[in-house]
Image: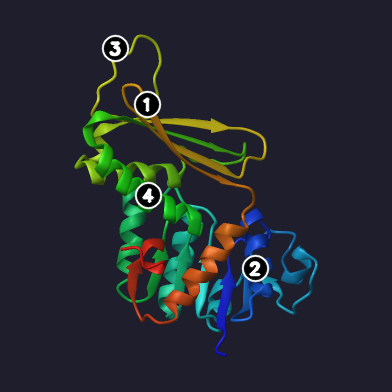
Amino acid sequence: MNQVRIAIAGASGRMGRMLIEATLKADDAVLVAAFERPESTFIGKDAGDLVGSSCGVTITSDVAEGLAKADCLIDFTRPEGTLQHLALARAAGCGMVIGTTGFSAEGKAEIAAAARDIPVVFAPNMAVGVNAVFKLLDVAARILNEDYDVEIIEAHHRLKVDAPSGTALRMGEVVAGALGRDLESCAIYGREGVTGERDGQTIGFATVRGGDIVGDHTVLFAGIGERIEITHKSGSRMPYASGSLRAARFLAAHKAGLFDMQDVLGLK
């Protein structure tokens, strides 16, 4: 069995640890590198110790050296760090799975440019269940059409720095696309004071931050006399890690190109 050689950025973070655990448990993947910032106290430690299972892979800040022996880098860090890693992955000819959110238009353009040389899966949410929900939202929006108001409610832990979440925004894009709307022009991200009646062409977003909520997303289609709610709730980060490994396996069959989880799951 050919094993996919995995490198993980942000090894000591919540997602980094989950990715290490998932990789160490997988029969068809092997952890070959784990990265942290130079000032991290985890530099020099065994990456497996973060999840209670030593593996012989030392956490390092030398990304270029680590990528030389990897097939795929999985990155759930911050936009600025991810783009630095992307440039190094491109130079190394290493594929990349990007779960980081909060990119600017310029950052997304950099990802698209790098994908001309290396294979990249870039998605706001790697969980298989969430991507099934994206498909359901497309179908629901086309059926319900213009007769239902759309509101998207998302909740995450207190440490999340961007809002709305990348997943919520992608949900909005899916619904807007199915309805023939442009999300950038029809999205409403907050309401306060006397706002007047709701414009039926808008898509509203509401954001909740608190505690240790992993991630809850609900899309509400509100009609006259009925409501339809499509909800996904994450109980842990393991679905994101499992989906990321699935994406890494997918990339092993590609030399270059920009993909998302809908491609990985064959939903397009």
Alpha carbon separation for disc pair 4 and 3: 31 Å
Residue 70 location, quadrant: bottom right
How crowded pointer 4 is (Cα within 10 Å; few <14, some 14-19, many 20+) is rated as: some
Q: Which residue is mark 4?
A: 136
Q: Amino acid at mark 4?
A: Leu
Alpha carbon separation for disc pair 4 and 2: 27 Å
Secondary element type, mark 2: helix
- Identified at 49% across, 32% down, the residue is 207
How crowded pointer 2 is (Cα within 10 Å; few <14, some 14-19, many 20+) is rated as: many
Mark 2 vs 1, N-terminal side: 2
User: 18 left or right of 248?
Assistant: right
Q: Are marks 4 and 2 in contact (CB under 8 Å)?
A: no
User: Quick check: 230 above or below 99?
Assistant: above
- Identified at 49% across, 55% down, the residue is 129
Q: Amino acid at mark 2?
A: Ala
Mark 4 vs 3, N-terminal side: 4
Alpha carbon separation for disc pair 2 and 3: 49 Å
User: Residue 22 got which mark?
Assistant: 2
How crowded pointer 3 is (Cα within 10 Å; few <14, some 14-19, many 20+) is rated as: few
How crowded pointer 1 is (Cα within 10 Å; few <14, some 14-19, many 20+) is rated as: few
Mark 1 vs 4, N-terminal side: 4
